[in-house]
Image (cartoon, grey):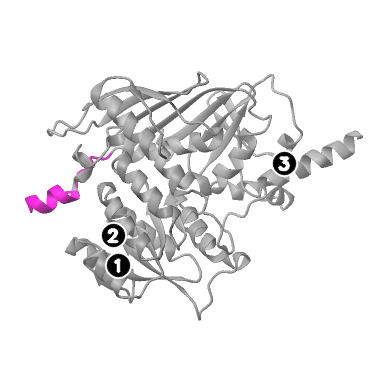
Amino acid sequence: MNEIDRRKFLTHTAGGMAAMALIPNLKAFGGFSNEDPMRIGVIGVGRQGREIMGELGKIAGVSVVSVCDVDERRLSSGLRRASGATGYATVKELLASGTVNAVAIATPTHTHREVALECINAGVHVYLECPLAHTKEDCIAISEAARSSAGVIAAGLHGRSNPVYKLARGFFRSDSVRDLISMRAQNNRKTSWVTPSNDPVRKAALNWKLDPERANGLAGEWGTQQFDVFHWYTGKYPSRVIGNGGNRFYQDGRKIHDTIACSLMFEDGSTLGYDATLANSYGGKQEIFFGSNAAIKLGWSHGWLFKEADAPTQGWEVYANRQQFHNDEGITLIAGATKLAEQGKLKEGIGLPNPSVYYALEDWISSIATSESPACSIAEAARATVVGIAANQAIMNGKSVDIDLTGL
């Protein structure tokens, strides 16, 4: 192969890895006609549920026709955002109405088992936000029900359907990164996790995340989403975790730590370092893979590849957009990069136009239309959730915890 042919080959190969539509067209997957629309009910309309409602509103051929929440104020708020929708106080009432053929569940984690099983057994399609559940036993119960379900059951681990993350995974599994050296992730967000209320009973219900009997702390509630990215990229799961945490900022008597750090160990000797805090927002939410040829940094709406000085040139770099990070230069990972470069619009493709939950919901909808498996199965979500549960146990107890994924 001469140099010109080689350059064309590399350009087309890179384009094949990069050419992914940022906003998939549902018509390409069959979609839903006006005669047979996808009628969706959203169960749990707190912050996450309301975001789901907003993102579903962007997808052609679907309509939020029902809203369900046990909290009257949140139910009223949800109904104001879903024009023409009907409100229900219980899942049983929603399902009995016969108005929906699919539901998106965004209730508190410790309620997932009861709500999910009721919906799965009713035969509707289900999108279940993650973490999957509060305990391993609940994860197993949901997984077993999903295996025999008549509907498409998707788990809300957003990385697997994120266009930037799918693109980056292609580079990770090529020679661009090569040998995996280590992994690191963080989630820093300045927020109290407290929802105020003058009613003590309502306040306790709304602040379930601060109750160790109902929540698995930062490692479980936040870490599960990020741990799954590493499972998906490497095809491996950690076998042991150590960690620690404390309340570095909020001195309000809470039993859930506001700042944590843990190290997850894999059988091959590799490690994943994870830290999170409610007390500082610097760096936000990110995952980094360190390889012998390059590092990949992911930030949910953006991604970058940082090549080592001695890494071989593969040809596609000449078309890449670059960003400077102090003394390092990162190659921006852009979905559809080759086509945009040909149009002279490469920089216009930096970042995603929608939040990650949009792509997870779009994937679920298209999976229903095509009868194909969703990007993230309940089984994969169960494994990621159990890793998060074990990490929280290690942090709370200050001891090493073996991660047991048997039965999942």
Question: What is the number of callouts on the image?
Answer: 3
Task: Look at the picture and state if 94 lies above or below 302.
Answer: below
Q: Amino acid at mark 1?
A: Val
Q: Secondary structure at mark 2?
A: loop
**Residue 226 image point, x, y percent:** 43, 37
Marks 1,2: beta carbons within 8 A = yes
Residue tagged 2: 45
Q: Residues within 10 Å of mark 1 (few under 14, many from 20)?
A: many
Magenta stretch? 191-206
Q: Amino acid at mark 2?
A: Val
The C terminus lies in quadrant: top left
Q: Amino acid at mark 3?
A: Ala
Left or right: 117 in relation to 74 = right
Residue 195 colored in magenta in the image: yes
Task: Look at the picture and state if 326 lies above or below 114.
Answer: above
Residue tagged 3: 14
* Quarter where residue 164 is shown: top right
Q: Residues within 10 Å of mark 3 (few under 14, many from 20)?
A: many
Which of the two labelled residues, at mark 1 and mark 2, occupies the earlier sequence position? 2
**Residue 190 image point, x, y percent:** 29, 37
| Residues at marks 1 and 3, CA–CA distance in whole angstroms | 44 Å
